[in-house]
Structures are given as C-alpha cells and as structure tokens.
Amino acid sequence: MAESETLAMTRIARELRANGKDVISLSIGEPDFNTPGIVKDAAKHAIDDNWSHYPPVPGYPDVLQAISDKFKRDNHLDYRPEQIVISTGAKQSIYQVVMSLVNPGDEVIIPTPYWVSYREIVKMAEGNPVYIRSNIENDFKITPQQLQKAITPRTRLLMFSTPSNPTGMLYSRDELLAIAEVLKTYPHVMVMADEIYEHIRFEGKHESMAQFDFIKEQVITVNGVAKGYAMTGWRAGFIGAPLPVAQACSKLQGQITSGSCSISQRAVLAAMQINPDTSEDIIQMKNIFKRRRDMLYQRLSMLPGFKVCLPQGAFYFFPDISELFGKHVPDGALFETMYGKKTIENATDLCMYLLYDANVATVQGDAFGDSRCIRMSYATADTLLVEAMNRIEHAIYALK
C-alpha cells in the first residue's frame, strides 16, 4: 500500500520548515478557517454534560435523525436514521463501503483524476481498479459512453466525487442523470458518491446522484463535516445508504473502531442544524474561497506551460503542466543537487523543483491518476497565496 501522496508532501513540507526553510504549503486539503462557534460550544457542553461513554456503533439516535433531516433539507434525499452510519471521518466511511461491497477480483470503476485514497482502499479490498480517463478539455468529467464501455460482469462499484478533489469541477443534474441512465441497466453495480465538498461551490446548486429514484437503491452517499464546516480535526463523516449496505458498514465498524467519538458526534449534531444557505460562517468561507480562486485563476492562466480550467467548487486547481516536460532547470538549482538531473521529465519533477527551489509544496498529479497535472490547494491565507504565486512564477520563468 502506498503512502498518501498528499499527506507525504505535507510531511516533507513540515520537515523542511522545521529545518528553517520558509515553505508555503499548497498541498493539503484543509480549510484555513476555524470551526463555527455554535459547534464548539456544543462540544464544550457535551464534555460538561458527561457525554463520555461508548456511543451506539452507527451513532446516537438524535444525531442520526439530524443527519437524516440534513439530507432532506439540503439534498432532497430520504435516508431514514437506520440507513445512516457515522464514522471517524468520511475516509473511514469510504473504507467501510468498499470493504462491505468489494470481493477479491471485483472491478471498481474510478474516473480519473480521483482522490488519492480511492485507489489504495480498493487495493486493500483486493479489488481491481478500472480507470476511466478524462482530461482538462472536458473539465475532467467522464461521459456516459465511457462508463458504458467500462462496465463488465465483474464490475461491482463506481466511485467518484462531486465537487471533485482534485479538480474542483462538479457534475450538473443533466450529467448525473445521463450516468444514472447507464447504471440503471446494471443493477449489480453500486455507486459511491463522495459529496464532502457540497457546501464549497461557486455556481449553481449541489446535485446528488441519489436524487434519481430509479437508481437510489444502488447509491451510497458519503459526506461529513470536515470541509464545509471547517471541522477536519473532529474526524466525523457519515453515509446514507440502502439499508443492507448501512447494516454491513455498521457491523464492520463495530469490529474496527466501535463508534465515532462521542464528543464529536455532539458537535456534528450542532453542525447539522446549521442551514448552509443562511450561515454567515459558511457563506463567508465560500466567498473567501471564491476570491482566492479568481485571483489564482488569473495568474495561472498567464503562466507559460500551465493549462487551467476554472474550478466550480472545492478549493483546488489541477493544471495540466505537460508542456513543461523537457525543460531544464537553471544552473545551481537545488533540484539538480537533490535528484542529479537538470530536466523536468514529469509532474513529480516539477513538484520537487517547486518545493526545493521555490519553497512551495504542491502534489504531483500521479497521486490522482493523471501524470500530466499537479494539484494546488488555495486553502491558505491570501498573502501566502500571492507570495506562493510570485515564487512559482519566478521558478517557471527560470526554466530553459
């Protein structure tokens, strides 16, 4: 099993900072905002009120009901509390879904680019990842025709995210409907729709795959509080799923972690009662991300060798930088000292060049299934983003 490349790059950046290097990290997907006060207060009260005992494995009944209400309010989805399982982060939710559904040799369709852990979780289940390639020209989205061609009798699961990590693109209702029309003819294929970034979008409204009743029993909706509510460290995610899948995930969780943290669940209860359309915290965070996106898009669009599309959600850019392959680093570059070569041959080389010679951490596109690109997170302060772009521009213009 490979180490998570996003976490690996973040670790390297921290190590360099510990050694005195002024590294700006654009590698990790974590909002640089604090958890809303109402959520923190709920957790403090939970401690004082002694919510310190083992919780039910799938979650406290009132928290499950609050998530059910959230699905209805925000997504127009009907998931009963017994169809919901709260886990220690959406990553655990995804792990349990895959482990519950995928047997050795089963095929799992993963559109590229994808979030780094999809591939490794499928491998842990001894499934076979089947990749559907997309590109920047079609906004990194797959077509129904591509999906149709990829499905075989061994296909068990389709995994995708909208809004997307790493591209920031999102599927429209019509695009999801076209995919659903394909899937309805293959009832043996389940769908895991990762919607963790639903509240960080800059146009339109969020669309859920499970909204189409004719495939609802094939869809598992994964979500959580990490991104939209700035609660990454609280480690709380959840699924809404067909009852047999929810029961299987709960059984598996009972043998792994028992239940999600009792204090975090009380915080989740408060978060679920926040209306994202009227919450000042969420609206302000989204507006700041949009401002950063627009600034970064303007500068990246003018950078030689960078091909970018405008993200519609999340907080990432995923530029195609393949035009820079074959370029030579300037004389005396630390990249040459560290790697013993002068040529940028791939996305990993470019990331290492930017890390050591521009002191900016990004993530190579190979981690997400696309070796032509790099991922850049703009979940950091405006001043740091401006400085990071100044450094990146200087380093790119220095290539020969």
Image (cartoon, helix red, strand yellow):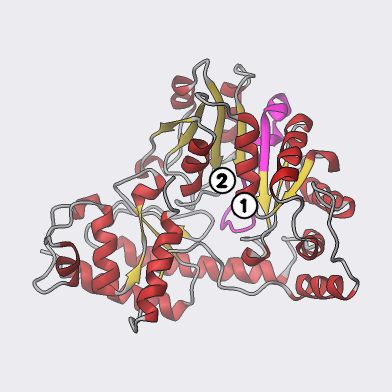
- Identity of the residue drawn at 42% across and 73% down: 14
Q: Nearer the viewer, residue 356 or 138?
A: 356
Label 2: how many Cα within 10 Å (few below 14, some 14–19, many 20+): many
Instruction: Identify the secondary structure beneath mark 1.
Output: loop
Q: Nearer the viewer, residue 157 or 219?
A: 157
Q: Is residue 80 visible?
A: no
Residue 353 appears at what percent x and percent y? 23, 65
Residue 333 appears at what percent x and percent y? 15, 72
Q: Residue furthest front?
A: 255
Mark 1: amino acid: Ile
Q: Quadrant of the C terminus?
A: bottom left
C-alpha distance separating marks 1 and 2: 8 Å
Label 1: how many Cα within 10 Å (few below 14, some 14–19, many 20+): many
Query: Which residue is labeled 2 in the image?
Result: 162
Q: Where is residue 375, by image quadrant?
A: bottom left
Query: Which residue is labeled 1 in the image?
Result: 196
Left or right position of 9 against 60: left
Left or right position of 260 against 125: right
Whether residue 219 is in magenta: the answer is: yes
Q: Where is residue 125, by image quadrant?
A: top right
- Identity of the residue drawn at 57% across and 41% down: 172
- Identity of the residue drawn at 64% across and 60% down: 226
Mark 2: amino acid: Thr
- Asked if the residue under mark 2 is in contact with the one under mark 1, i.e. CB atoms within 8 Å, the reply is no
Q: Is residue 47 above or below residue 212?
A: below
Residue 157 appears at what percent x and percent y? 57, 29
Q: Where is residue 78, by image quadrant?
A: top right
